[in-house]
Structures are given as structure tokens and as C-alpha cells.
Image: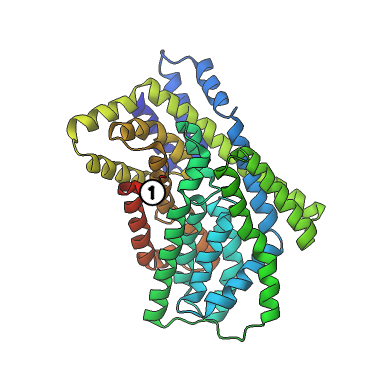
Amino acid sequence: MSALILLVFLGGAVLAVPIAHALLLAAMAAAATSDRVPLDLLVQQMVSQVQSFPLIAIPFFMLTGAIMMGGQLGTAMVGVLSATVGRWHGGPAQVSVLSSTLFGGVSGSAVADASAIGSLLMPWHRRLGYPMAFSAASLASAATIDIIIPPSIPMILYAMSSNTSIAALFYAGILPGLLLCSGFMTACWWVGKRDNLPRETSAVDRRVMLRNLWMASPAVLLPVFIVVFLRFGIATPTEVAVLSTLYAALVSAVLYRDLGIKRLHSAIVEAGIATGVVLLVIMASAAIGWLLTFDQLPQGVVAWVTTNIHTGWLVILLMNLMMLFVGMFIDLPAAVLLLTPVFLPLAHSVGMDPVQLGLMMVVNLAIGLYTPPVGTTLFITSALAKVKVGQTVRAMGPFYLVAFGVLLLVSYVPAVILK
């Protein structure tokens, strides 16, 4: 049954069928050809998977990002960063990295980051005469910091699949996210200095800069509130998501005064559509995960690995290679939900903490978002920069080195993420 699921799913992927639909087709094909799987039980598994209280956090975090980045906040944030680090070597690209890191504390979506920040920064980079392939590469990689620092939609999905604390995952993602930010900024500085790339040279208007700093401060404070509320048990992750949406609405309505009925409606529709896509992937992945477990695939993988590989670090290396490969072809939410049931017992067999496995999985799959052939942020930023994907990939070298360095730390140095 597992072989049939894989065959149908890969066939759908080759034919460019949406991932959720390909997963559903694979589940239906496996159930229809097996007399051991009751169809009503399969449907029950799909529906029960989305009847989860923590999942309510996903639409609210998405709505928070849509409200805050749809108004003046994004412009103010970019204005402050361009006036400060924009004058350094590689400064314009470093603005992309810092903007993505700050925006990550608002939405938790790499795709939203790449689209929103890219539409603000690309015209500025083009006006400076900046190499657009490097601009696209810096943003494509930096956008994935969003899904590592809190709040993170993939971490919520992993927590739901592995019965792990969302708060623990959020807290563990802070240091790896900051390491990626500092590493990407260093890579931008090095390339900027090596190639003598253009920098911002216009005089700084201090009044405008202070105003932008004041306007951008809510984006800096929001992730701090999230971490404090979760760290000290003031609110659950779902309650924090609702509070962050209320915070975003109040800031946009009172401070920015740009939240009208029309923009609120657009933000709600945007968040609703994005949530619908995620929930469909969750349901389809739940069906596949249940069928694979029913077919005892996870137990088979663990038995094969423990029989043939007797060193813990080799098991971790094997998991990393498999995650990197899967992340190159499958959307991140689906990959998290499919891989968690397979790798969780494997991680237990080598004594790996579930929180460490979750961070390792998210960092691996994040790299897949800017790696061909199906890198979502890679294609988005290349389109915004109006360059070929191949040109962007050739400029990715320093960012891959940084990402793999952080991945090694997360995989083999648990102290980086665990208390």
C-alpha cells in the first residue's frame, strides 16, 4: 500500500497537480484498492485532524501579518533599515535580511514575507543599480527566517503531529533564527565588499528616520510580547495568536489610522484563503499519515535503520539528507505532516528530543524553499527581481553555507535550542 501511495503521489506531482489534491488522490487510490481500510474510518481521520484547538492559532497569526504589513508598517520598517544599514557594504541586501527577521515576528509565513518585503525593496535595489540576482537570493533565503522564529506556522503543525509543546518550539527557534540573521548579514557584507556593490549614499533625514522608527516599533515589540506571554505561561499559543491580531488591529487603527473596512476585509479574505489551503493540506496529509502508519511504514523504517546503522550521528545525518531531499519537491506544510510520523520514532531511537527534531525538520525544509526545482521563495523573489531562477541560484552560494552551518548546530549541538 505504501508503494502505491508513493507512486500515485509522485505521478500527481509530475503532472503539476496541487500537493493537497495529489495527496488526496494517493489516499483514495490506496483505500480503494485495499480491503483492509474502511473508507468511513479514513474520512474520520481526516476530519478529526482539523478539530484541534491549537490550529485556531494559524488563521489569527496569518491575519495579524496581513493587517500589519498591509499598511504603513512595512514602508516605515524599510525606511529605518535603509537609513542605517543601507550604507554598509552589502547594506541593501542586509536590509532584506533584517526586514524578514522583523517581519517574521509578525506573520510566521515565508511566502508572505517574500511577497511583501520584495515588493517594497526590489524597486529601491533597482534604483541603486544593485545586482538583482543577488537581491533575489538574499531575500529568498532570508524570508525563511520567518518560519524559524516565533510565531511559526510549520512549528504549530509539527507540534500538532508530534504532541510537542508549541511554546517550547517557539522558544527554541529564537537562537537559530538569530544565527541565520547574523550569518546572512555577514554573507551580504562579504559579497558587497568583495564586489564593491552599490550602497545608499543619500543624506539621512533624521526627522523622517525617527518618525519611521516610531512607526516601525510595534513590529519589533510584537514578537517580544509573544515570547514573554508564552515563556511565563500568561497565555496559550492560541490565545497569544488572538491577542496578536487584536494588537495589530488596534495599532493599525489608532497609531497608523490606515485600517479601514476595505483593508480589513481584504486582510480577512487573504488570511481565510491561506488558512483554507493549509487545512486542506492537513486533512490530506492526515489521511496519508494514517495509511502509512496502518501499513507499518514508520516501524519498518526504524527497524531497517537500527539494524543497519549503529551510530547516532549517522542516523541524524540520514534524517537530514532525507528531509533536504523531500523539501526540494514538497510544500513545507505537507512535508512536516508527512515526515513527522516517520522520523519521530527514529529520533526516539537515538535519544533525540522531539523539540530538537522539530527545529531540525523546519530548518531543513526551509532550505528547500529556496532550492530548485520547487523553491517557493526562490521563484517569488526571482519574479519580483525580473531575473531568471538560474541566476538567483548562482548567487545563493554564501547563503547555503550559512544555512548548512546553522543546520549542523541544530542537529548536533542540542544546547543551541534546548534549555
Residue 338 versus residue 39 in the image, above or below:
below
Please name whichever residue, 277 or 388, is drawn nearer the observer in this view of the structure. Answer: 277
Q: Mark 1 falls on what kind of element?
A: helix
Circle 1 Cα neighbour tier, 10 Å, few/some/many (<14 / 14–19 / ≥20) = many
Q: Which residue is disc 1 drawn over?
A: 364
Left or right of 206? Residue 136 is left
Please identify the quarter of the rendering in which residue 190 is found. bottom left
Q: Quadrant of the N terminus?
A: top left
Please identify the quarter of the rendering in which residue 71 is found. bottom right
Residue 275 versus residue 299 in the image, above or below:
below
Could you tell me residue 319's position as x and y percent?
Answer: 31, 41
Color scheme of the displayed model: rainbow
Could you tell me residue 155's position as x and y percent?
Answer: 49, 42
Left or right of 399? Residue 314 is left
Question: Residue at point 40% right, 53% down?
Answer: 367
The residue type indicated by label 1 comes to: Asn
Please name whichever residue, 187 or 276, is drawn nearer the observer in this view of the structure. Answer: 187
Residue 105 versus residue 309 in the image, above or below:
below
State whether residue 396 appears in this view.
yes
Question: Residue at point 33% right, 35% down?
Answer: 347
Please name whichever residue, 261 or 156, is drawn nearer the observer in this view of the structure. Answer: 156
Please identify the quarter of the rendering in which residue 272 is found. top right
Question: Residue at point 63% right, 43% down?
Answer: 240
Could you tell me residue 233's position as x and y percent?
Answer: 58, 39
State whether residue 24 appears in this view.
no
